[in-house]
Structure formats: structure tokens, C-alpha cells
Amino acid sequence: MFFLLGMAPGFWASALTNILTAKHLEEWVTLAFLVGPVTAIISPLIVGALADQRVRAERLLAWISIGGSILLYGAFWTLEHDWNPWWFISLLAANSLLSGPMWGLCTTVALAHLDSPQRKFPLARLGGTIGWMAAGLITSHVLHADRSAIAGYASVVPRVLLGLLAFALPATHPTGTGRSWLSLLGIDAFALLKERDHLVFFVVTGLLSIPLAAFYMFVPRHLEALGDFQASATMTFAQWPEVLAMLTIGAVMTRWRIKTVLTASLVIHVLRFVSFTLAGITDEKLWLMPGVVLHGIGYTFYFITAQIFLDRRVPQGLRGQAQGLLTLVSGGLGSSIGILLSGHLYDLTVVHQAGGWATFWSVQTSILVLCLGIFVLFYKGREREV
């Protein structure tokens, strides 16, 4: 399931900037990347609340995946046939609204049925990484679709398969008891922010997601600017080390405190964006590669640890909503701010040559330094959190 879940966006997410550029729709790139995070502010909490209180999580995952595949096909069909770009944006937004909770739902199902989740969940989640890598390689080397809507069509196949196979997942029954409108809208999850560590964790996660949005949007463009026209394949180098991280994160979490693991991941992200800044200074692709390669390690050590952290520290009846809140903060608020900031910053620094790529990436680096400082200073943690 995680393999198919990662494969679907892996076909087109890294290629989207260059696909739109090939269609002479450069001015639509920011909006195209923005619709997913904006819709992630709306649907994950609501769907998480449904999974906690009303509907079996695996059934929700199945129907959402099948419905989203139809919308995704329609979006890229309108793009290929040169319809008004608003058709593409609208259908992509509808797909994002429906599909935004999928990672959270799959995580909820996995954590509900795996014994010793700190060891076994990363191995299951590894499938998503392998799926994303496979899709990127197929896009560049088999479909030759780094600048084509074919990449979007390809993603429909794993989405449909995922929906069908989700019906075979173990039954994951609702465990929550809330029945008020606020509960059904997922508002109960915000009560988690009353605890200091939770508040610090979610604030840092939101800030971290700002430069991560720039990574997904603009590293492919920077690669192309430096002469790499198979950016989708190059971006898969972000996932190769992620495989190793997924295999080792369980052992790491049994030996280190969660605070230590999360701090280490933030340090890695700072180093990644320093390397991007150096690529902007030197105009050498070689300096981009450490930042790409370290992405999978930094991402795994932060977000996989975060998902297990929430499953451990949140009451059972709120776990679906907690995963939804994580999606809202990271994939919704943080990514929305990151996309808007990055789009404006790119126009200012690169297009209008006010500092170029060096200034663009140095601003993102400063945000990560802020994340690291807040977390180290204000997150307390427990002696044994796993």
C-alpha cells in the first residue's frame, strides 16, 4: 500500500514545474503547487475525525484513492489538450482536497495493526520511498516525460490499484466517542496544543515545511538551469539514502530520545540548504547534490519519528485527528506559506537578479536555523519516549 501511495505522486510531483514550463505556463507554477497545501488545511482533520469516530479508516482510504484518480486524470487531460489553465488548477485542487488525508489514513491503519510500531512501521513506510523512486526513474528513463502530461496519466494506475487493494486491509474501526459538530470537524485535535512539547513540535514542523516546499518546487528548476534535463531522475537521489534511514530508524529510536532524533534531523536539513546556497554561489551542480542526497535522511528522521511520536503520546480516540493535524501543519499551513514565499522570492532573486540562487537558498537556510534554535531551546521531552 505504501509503495503505491508513494508511486502515484512520484510520477509527476518533481516534474510538474518543468511540465508547466514546457506548456509556457511558468506563471501558474506557484498556484499549481499551492492548491495541495491549501486543501490540506481543510480535509485531513475532517477525514481523520471520520476515521476516529464514524467510518473504518481502510474504507475511507479506498474510496478516496479511486475518486482522486479520476480527478487527477482529468486534470492532466485538460493540460495536455491546452484547455484554460484554470481547468487544470481546479481539478488538481479537487484531487488534493479528496486525497490530502491519504498518508494519514494509511499511517493510522498501519500503526493500529503493527506490533512494535517503532521498529516495524518504518519498514512498511519504506514502500512509499521505493515507490516514489521507481516512479521518478520511470518518468525520466522509460516514459521520457519530464516535460509531458504523460507523467500525470501514469500516476493514475497506482492510485486505482491502491484503492482496490485498500479493501483488503485489516478492518480499522473507529475508537473515538465524540459526536459534536466540533468533534466531527476534527477541532478536538487542537487541544493537543495545550501541552508545551506538542505546541513546540507543531510550530517547528510548520516552519520546517516552508523551506521543504522550496526544495520540491525549485531544486528541479535549479538543476535544469545548471544543465540537468532529467531532473526527475536526479531527484530520486533524495530517496536512495532514505531507504537506509528507514531501515535504521527503528534501531535509532530504541537507543536515542525522540528529542535527540528530531534535533539531528533539523541539523541535517540546515546542512542541506547550506549546500544549495553554495550551489547558488558557485553555479556548480555538484553542490546541489549533497542537499538532494541528504533529503531522505533528514525527512525520515523527522517525519517518521513524528508520526510514531504522535501515536505514542496521543489518546487512542484522537490518533487519526493527530495525524490529520500533522498533515495540516506540514502539508497545509507550512507548505502554503513556503510556496507563496518561494514563488515571490524566486521572482525577486532569480528572475529579477536580486542576488540570484545564492540569496534564494540562503533565506530558506535561515528559516531552518530558526527551527533548530526553537526546538533545542523550548522542547523538553521525556526520558524514554519510545
Image (tube, rainbow, N blue to C red):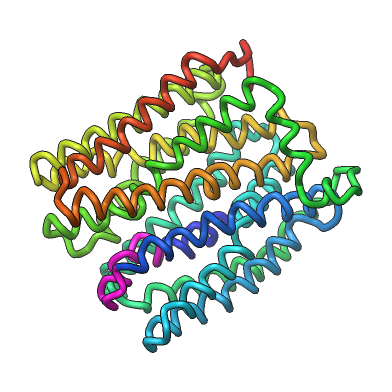
Residue 304 in magenta?
A: no
Image: 79 above or below 116: below
Which of the two residues, 231 or 326, is positioned nearer the viewer here? 326
Q: Is residue 142 visible?
A: no
**Residue 381 occupies quadrant:** top right
In x, y percent, where is residue 317?
82, 39
Instruction: Name the side, left or right, on which 283 lies relative to 54.
Output: left
- The kind of secondary structure the magenta stretch mainly shows is helix
Image: 62 above or below 118: below
Instruction: Name the side, left or right, on which 175 lies relative to 16.
Output: right
Q: Magenta span covers which residues?
A: 11-26
Residue at horizontal 22 percent and vertical 63 percent from the top? 230
Residue at horizontal 29 percent and vertical 68 percent from the top? 26
Residue at horizontal 52 percent and vertical 54 percent from the top? 37
Quarter of the image with the N terminus in it = bottom right
Residue 15 in magenta?
A: yes
